[in-house]
Structures are given as structure tokens and as C-alpha cells.
Image: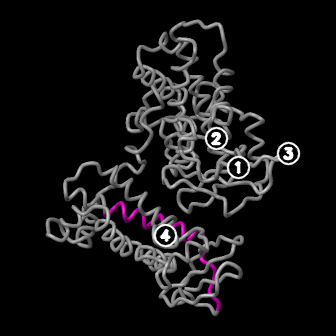
Amino acid sequence: MRLTSAKIMPKMKLTTSFRVIHHLIIINTAKIRVEIAPEFVNYPTIPRNPKEKITKQVKKLIVWLLYINSAVLKNLHATGTISNNCELVDWIFNQIFEPQNSLPVIGRFTSQDIQALKKGKEFGPIQKMIITLLSSSLTSNREPQTALMIISNYYEEKCPQVSCALKSGQIHDLRSLVIQTTNSKMRIGSGFDGGSWIQALGNFPVRSLQQLPDSLKAKSCYSDINNGWIGVDLGPSKQELSCHIMKIFLVRNPRMSAALSFSFNDSKFPVVITLKMKPDNQGRRQGWVWLRDTGNQVKMKRQLVLNKLNKFMNHLNICHSALLRHLKNTKFQIDFEIKPLLINWIHQVLFDVNQNKLPLLGDFVVEDGIPINSFSPEDFNLIQTLLIRLITSQHSHRRNFQAALSVFGYWLKNMADDLYSQLFKNDEEYWDILTKIIDASIYAENETLSF
């Protein structure tokens, strides 16, 4: 491993079995980069270790960790598997990006961070295991053995009762247990973090994904869109975003201070807040809110975020159309238009910073004396939190209707008018009626759309 820096620390050479380089970002911060180990290179010069490869290896490692943990808990007949898996994911994210008493495997650190560590002790045992994995080739398939070593440490540190069960022979050793479980073709949950998903928006319950009709859970990110139209016989679904929101996506990303970039220490809240290099026209400090990829922790591409936000708005529009169908079916008369109120509300609740909350995306004024790392998930409202979870989810296409129906129901129930209570006896009836209307209106994949 080599650590070199021109201004913040003397040159160092550390003898280890892997290589890590850090790059100077500004005067007091540096960035970790894991290189490919020489034994996996057939060229005179060592090529860069691509982000795509690292992302794949991290994802495969997490899958194996969850697989092993679920197998262990199943053999112990333990309850709360989902919550235990969530804790495991949070723990491994911390080990990679924000470990205690170690430099991160991926990310930035300061001169103070490395000066606080003894020479040769810059990385802890978990970090060394992960670096060894990331410096290997994809074809080496080191994820299973790395996961076995890491989870043994996890049980020692976080789950002593599991560690005791392993040592006492109450359950098989981990390697034998994995082989046995693999042969039994055990599946790890539904794959859609159902137990850790948002259960309610304030006073409005969120119906679980398992309770929704299959037609409301798209099989892929492409199956619910056809040339900008969702295959639902409730009229056009496309809903344009406001000019204010579009400006956020059209403006080039501003120059950022890498030293003043802050990410929440929560795998379920992948948000990064960065202080802009330049103040606004009034000389005030400005911050910038954006979302991170849950796999490689880099900022999500603008087009991807825009596409996912557009899809949510389209699904929200379908919920509005379903309500109009219900009004028609019940011959219920109203003397105002619902849609303008809904669209105005959703734009305000997501991006209006006058409500003492941060915007979902984009810039905001940082008050004097407020450090950039003082913000927390509580600085986002309920709807923003749900949208953050949805947009950053790898399975957002499965949850678009669930999220849209949740937001629409919350808004309808909390309107100043008592329309909700006049239309629905309770929350269950809201979910039953609107999901039934949408389910009956969705086109089969082999049908031809006609309007």
C-alpha cells in the first residue's frame, strides 16, 4: 500500500499485501482508491480499478453476508430476521465508508485521521479483508470466503449469542451451514426490504407490497412505461414537472468543496449535503442536496433521478385518475378541481424550504454559524423521506404504485376539506377501492393500447 501527499503529510511507504493509493483533494482532505493487485494483472502497467467492478463486488459481498446471516438465524429459529439483516447492512456500510479506528476503504479522510492512527495500523482487520476482495479480479469469486470471515467478526462484535452457538456446536460451522443451505435452495426474503419499508405517513398507513395486486408491482423498470404512457385505461398518465423542479436538473452541477461534503451515516437515507464553493447573489452560503447510489455511494446521475421522479409523478397522476373514476362510479359531485391542488401541494412539500425543511434536491441557504454536518434525516419531511427511499431503491419500479397511493392517500386524508371521510369509511377502504380500480384498468402486456 502506498500513501503519498504533497502538502498534508510526509511520504509514507507501508508494507502490506494489497495496494491503496490516496489522492489529494484539497489541502486537508484525501481520497482512498483501491488498486488491482499485481497477481491479477497480465500487463506491464497496472490498470485502474473501475468503479463498476468495485460496485459489483460490494453488492455480491452484501448478498453473501445476508445469505449467511439468514441461514444462521433460521437454524437458531431466531425471530426478527429482517431487522437483523438491516443492522448487518448498516454495520458493513460503516466498515466500508465510516469505520472507527481505521481509514475508510472507500471515501475521504483528513490528515488528522491518519495522524491519529499508528503506523501500520491505518486499516483494521475488516477493512483489510474488504480491500483484499476489491483488489482481486471479478473472476476470482472471493466474495463467499470474504463474507464468511467478515461475518465471523460481526458475530463476535455485535451478536455474541450467535458466536457462542457456533463455538458450542449448537449450529454447524459457517462453511458447512452455507453449503447445507445452498443445497436446500433457501431464498432470502422477498428481495424488496418489505419489513424495513416505511409503514406509515403520519396518520396514514402504508399498505405492504405483498398486499398489493401483482399488476401494481412492475416486473422491470421498463414494463410499466410505453412511450411515456403507463398501460392503464384511466386516461394519459404523463404529468409534467414544474419549471422550478426542471431548473434543478438543467443547471450544471456547481463546484463543490470536497472537504465540506457530508453524508448521513444511514444506509436507508443515502443523501449527501455539500457546501457550494461560491455564495449566492446576496453573499449567503449555499448548500446542495443530492442523492447517492446505494451501491457505490457516488452521487446519482441527474438523468436517472429525473426519470425516477417523473415515474413517481406519472403514478401519482394515475391515482388522481382512479379517484375521479371512483367519484363517477359513486355519482359523488364536487365543485372544485382536485389535480391543481395536488400538484401544487406535492411541489411545495418536496422543494419549498420555507417549511423549515431542506429541499428534496437542489440548493438551499446555509445560515451563518450552522456547520454543514449538523443536518440530519429529521430535516426532511415525511413525503421527502419516502421519495428518497423510492428514488434510491434498486427496485423502485416495484414500489411506484405503492408510494404514489401512499402519498395521494396521505394528502387526501389531510386536506382541509373532509372529502376523504365522505368517500371512504376508513383507510382500508381507500386502499381496497383505488387498487381495485387501477388493477382492473391495467392493460395486459400482449394487449394493444387504445384510447
Look at discs 3 and 2 and give the one toward the viewer: 3
Q: Which mark is residue 358?
A: 2
User: Would you say the residues marked 1 and 2 are in contact, meaning their CB atoms lie under 8 Å apart?
Assistant: yes
The answer for how far apart the CA atoms under marks 3 and 1 are is 14 Å
Residue that numbered label 1 is attached to: 287
Which of the marked residues, 1 or 2, is nearer the chain's N terminus?
Answer: 1
Quadrant assignment, res 448: top right
The total of numbered circles placed on residues is 4
Magenta-colored span: 45-68
- What type of secondary structure mainly makes up the magenta span? helix
Crowding near the residue tagged with mark 3, few <14, some 14–19, many ≥20 C-alpha atoms within 10 Å = few
Look at discs 1 and 4 and give the one toward the viewer: 1
Residue 262 appears at what percent x and percent y?
61, 56
Residue shown at the point (59%, 75%) measured from the top left: 33
Q: Is residue 89 above or below residue 13?
A: above
Residue 110 appears at what percent x and percent y?
61, 71
Q: In this orientation, does residue 21 appear?
A: yes
Q: Quadrant of the C terminus?
A: top right
In the displayed structure, does residue 414 sit left or right of residue 77? Answer: right
Which of the marked residues, 3 or 1, is nearer the chain's N terminus?
Answer: 3
Q: Nearest the camera: 5 or 345?
A: 5
Whether residue 66 appears in magenta in the rendering, the answer is yes
Whether residue 63 appears in magenta in the rendering, the answer is yes
Residue that numbered label 4 is attached to: 57
Q: Quadrant of the N terminus?
A: bottom right
Q: Nearest the camera: 281 or 390?
A: 281
Which of the marked residues, 4 or 2, is nearer the chain's N terminus?
Answer: 4
User: Would you say the residues marked 3 and 1 are in contact, meaning their CB atoms lie under 8 Å apart?
Assistant: no
Residue that numbered label 3 is attached to: 281
The answer for how far apart the CA atoms under marks 1 and 4 are is 32 Å
Look at discs 3 and 4 and give the one toward the viewer: 3
Residue 441 appears at what percent x and percent y?
53, 27
